[in-house]
Amino acid sequence: MKNSNQAASPIAIIGVGLRLPGRVDGLDTLWPHLTGCHDLVTEIDPARWAVDALSHPRRSEPGRSITFAAGVLDDVAGFDAGFFGIAPREAELLDPQQRLLLELAWEAFEDADIPASSLAGSDCAVFVGISGLDYGMRVLDDLSSMSAHTMTGNTMSVAANRLSWTFDLRGPSMAVDTACSSSLVALHQACEALRQGQAPVALVGGVNLLLHPYPFVGFTKASMLSAGGRCRAFGAGGDGYVRGEGGGVLLIKPLADALRDGDRIRGVIRATGVNADGARKTGLTIPSGEAQAELMRAVLARSGLHSQDIGYVEAHGTGTRIGDPIEARAVGAVYGTGRTQPLPIGSVKSNLGHLEPASGMAGLAKALTVLQHGVAPPSLHTDILNPDIDFDALGLRVTREAVALPPGRRCVAVNSFGFGGVNAHVIIEQAPAAGDAVGSGAVSAALTGGNRSTAPSAGCAARQASSCSALVISAADEAALRQLAARYAEALADTTAPALLAQAA
């Protein structure tokens, strides 16, 4: 990536759809897990496959995985196919990753308080980070199960194209696979499309579901998975990463347009960037500290900020013996040196595992909550720090407890790199003060998410009369309507939600 001193035009994040381990269905439900130091890593349910038969404590054992520890979702099967106009026969062969993306896209529209129908026929772009082929591999286990829907249901490109088809979005539409950096690379591509005028608004995200044992076996043989079953990012004893599943979808548009339209702004993307390691390392899967530092400097220059403006770095932080020290040295060289106080760093992977192509969305979601609350929450499994990293010399501080961001402007950097050598970096800033009061999405944002099989139907548009004398609710069917009414009743009864009470008064 070429360095540039020309500041990039800022991009607003106006909607967030999120699904993570621990029943996380939005930024508000993620934050308590982070501040509560919750370890959300569990085990793959034996109902998915024969976990016991495929496990073995020796990495070299053929056809076996050393671990099936993972951050998992409670429900990967539930899906309201009828809501999206998908026939049951087609839905059966639809990769659950595509199903989840549809739900998350709808929830991102809801969070933004923008009806999906209002963008139908527009040049809204779609960029999706995705790399898992698990569901398709299950189909290949039984070739007789293939039908006319197999290919469209299990092709990576269609994961993005299906969103464009379902919502009639006519801008650029593509899937991005750079392994673990996929979703932040997709975000960079989406931001560039907006800046170049290719689209007025974009859906961008990433998804990862663990639906077949073969990646566990493969990553075991590559000595990448932690035998202990935990991501000890920047901690002593880190022996690899733990897999995780989930996803996130953002709705983004140029900041100037968001302010003009009165959108509620979750955060502002100041700059993004992507580069590749090339051959400046000893192996294909070994990270390059030189390449990472080069990218960070370039993105920082494009942001128009100074290194001291960055109050926290959400690192890639997988807990590997090689990767963590390399990343720490790169972050320290760009952001840590010359500071009066050490720079806080951490990794959400220590809470919920590594979501691989969707990991950038998980890290970005955490970064948005850090901006919102002004606090960097603890990073887990760091009671003893990695002795191979000189944090003091690098000007870095692993957040072993909550750390308040410095007063003034709040800016956070998010780092991500793929095991093939593609790096991505993003700098985001707290929403402008005016954005805190604009938009009318507070109620609908608080109520999006919930049960996966019914959340999209239950989240249909609700509008209050200007006099606040009536709360009008609609949904696709009676069951969804009842669920939505119950969720509104629960939210309005919550005395800790003054914004909701004010609107209901």
Image (cartoon, grey):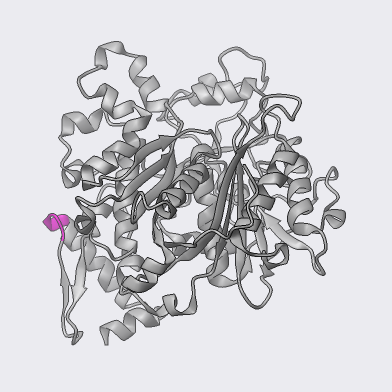
When the figure is inspected, residue 293 is found, relative to residue 60, above or below; the finding is below
Q: Quadrant of the C terminus?
A: bottom left
The residue under the point 45% across, 52% down is 191
Q: Position of residue 363 (x, y in %)?
A: 55, 52
Q: Is residue 489 left or right of residue 310?
A: left
List the single residue furthest toward the left. Answer: 478
When the figure is inspected, residue 378 is found, relative to residue 492, above or below; the finding is above
Majority secondary structure of magenta residues: loop
Q: In terms of depth relative to the viewer, which is nearer, 102 or 382?
A: 102
Q: In terms of depth relative to the viewer, which is nearer, 274 or 380?
A: 274
Q: Is residue 6 visible from the viewing direction of this image?
A: yes
When the figure is inspected, residue 62 is found, relative to residue 76, above or below; the finding is above
- What is the quadrant of residue 316 in the picture? top right
Q: Position of residue 271 (x, y in %)?
A: 55, 56
When the figure is inspected, residue 323 is found, relative to residue 352, above or below; the finding is above
How many callouts does the rendering have? Answer: 0
Q: Quadrant of the N terminus?
A: top right
The residue under the point 34% across, 51% down is 199
Residue range (magenta): 475-479
Q: In terms of depth relative to the viewer, which is nearer, 481 or 150?
A: 150
